[in-house]
Structures are given as structure tokens and as C-alpha cells.
Amino acid sequence: MKKKFSIKKIAFVAVVALLTMLVAIGSLSYFYQDKLIALFVEELNRHLKAKVEVEKIDFSVWDKFPQAAFTLTKPKIMSSADSSVVLAQAEELYFTFSLRDLWHKQYKVTELSMENGFIKLVVDEKGNPNYLVYQSADTAAGDALSFNLEKITLKNVAISYDNLQTKQLYDTHTDDLIASLGITDKGMEIAAKGNVLVKAARIGKQTWLREKQVALNTLMLLDTDKQHLTIKPSELRIQKAVKLQRIEP
């Protein structure tokens, strides 16, 4: 009987401790949300070279629990080549960090999640890309908030790449794609894995794929100095093992 009572008591104490912790976290987020949002906007401006329009910015510990999240509602990120052209747009954009950071007051944003939107990557006839909008920024040891994006998740996002110089067009859509981001001296390394619907893949006047599901595992290198994107040897598994073939337009 004592053993049964002890188990109940331990369970009760654990529940009370959990509720106390959640209330404390909720209180911290409520009282510090304006300060946190101001820090976030300041740091975001240090990393973005393009204009950003957003309906509102919120901070919550519940939207992406057990991560804390800055939520951008209806954000528009403009092109680096032309500030009037939209590079990316979404219903929601989440930047998340560990709840433990709230206690230490050192906030490291490590994940980005984009939901219900599109990304339009374009290279013009002269070879100028529109997507060089992110830049690394030196972070001092005392900075309260910093960006160290390690994971990017895309859910229900259309992605297109249109290179007008090399006459290549890739029009795709993904319901769930996960990417990791690494900053190097020369630029960025982007590793991506997930399922993608290739609506069209065209080189010159030849269409090689249309309306095919593809399991993707790839590594891309973005040289920001040379403004050059390199796609390393990648693993592509096409629906029903269909071979690449030319499709007449």
C-alpha cells in the first residue's frame, strides 16, 4: 500500500513541477516578448540584404513547443537584384530556439520553418542571381541573440529555379523538405532531403521531366563572391524508376 502511495506521490510531484515550469516559461515569454522581438528584428536586419515586408511578428513558447518561436505572419522577402520583385512569400515563417535559452538570456536561433508559400530563384541573362539576400554577420560574445541556422523545413512550398543565362528551368513543389545550412568562408553549403513534385524540368527547349515525384538528397554550394550555385552529385529517385526522357512541348 505504501509503495502504491509513493508512486502516486511521485507522479503528483512531477506533474506539479512540470506545470510550474510551464507557467514560469509562459510568464517569461509574456514579460519579455517585446524585448525579444526587438532583438530578433535587429539581428535579422544584420543578416538580410533585401527588403522584407511582414504583416506582424509574434513570439510564443507554444507554437513550436518544445522550441520557442518567432512567428512572421505573411512575410514577403524581396529579390536582391530588384527590390520590387518578390523572392519568397509564405503564410507563416518560424524562427526557433531552445527554451533553455530563456533562462540563460542568450538566444541562439537554430531552425527556420516555412509553411504555405513559394520561393522563386532567378538568374538573369547577365548571370546575376536574385537570391543573394542572406549574409553572415559577426556575433560578439555578449550579443543576446544570434543566428546559427542549422535546419530549414519547408512545408507546402513551391520552389522554382529559372536561369535565363543557361536556359534552365526547374518548377517544383514540396510538402515536406528538410535542409541543413552551413556557413563557409566562401558562402553557404545547403544539404536538402525530402520528397519533391517536379512539375517541369527543362534545359533549353527540351523538357526532361514533367509531373513526377522525386525523392531528393542533394548538396548545393553557394559562392556568394562569385555569385555561383554549384549542385554536387545528388541522389534522385524518380517515381516508379522512370528514366529521364525528353518530352516534346
Image (spheres, helix red, strand yellow):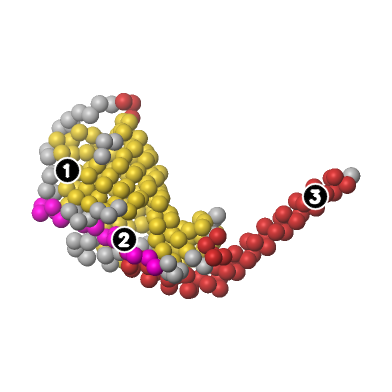
Q: Nearer the viewer, residue 189 or 133?
A: 189
Look at the image and tell me whether residue 133 can be seen: yes
Q: Earlier in the sequence, mark 3 or mark 1?
A: 3
The residue under the point 12% across, 40% down is: 204
Q: Position of residue 31 (x, y in %)?
A: 56, 73
Location of residue 102 by image quarter: bottom right
> On the rendered image, what quadrant is the C terminus found in?
top left
Q: Residues within 10 Å of mark 2 (few under 14, many from 20)?
A: some
Quick check: 116 above or below 240? Answer: below
Q: Which mark is residue 8?
A: 3
Which of the 4 quarters of the picture holds residue 54? bottom left
At numbered mark 3, what does the secondary structure look like: helix, strand or loop? helix
Please name the residue that numbered disc 1 is placed on: 168
Q: Is residue 144 left or right of residue 90?
A: right
Residue depth check, mark 2 versus mark 1: number of the one nearer the observer: 2
Identify the secondary structure beneath mark 2. Answer: loop
Quarter of the image where the N terminus is located: top right
Residue 147 magenta-drawn?
no
Residue, disc 2: 136
Residue bounds of the magenta highlight: 124-140
Real-space Cα separation, disc 2 to disc 3, in angstroms:
52 Å
Mark 3 is on which residue type? Lys
Q: Earlier in the sequence, mark 2 or mark 3?
A: 3
- Residue 92 shows in the view: no
Q: Residue at x 38, y 40 (%)?
A: 194
Q: Residue furthest front?
A: 141
Q: Is residue 138 magenta?
A: yes
| Relative side of 139 to 205, left or right | right
Looking at the rendered structure, the kind of residue marked 1 is Gln
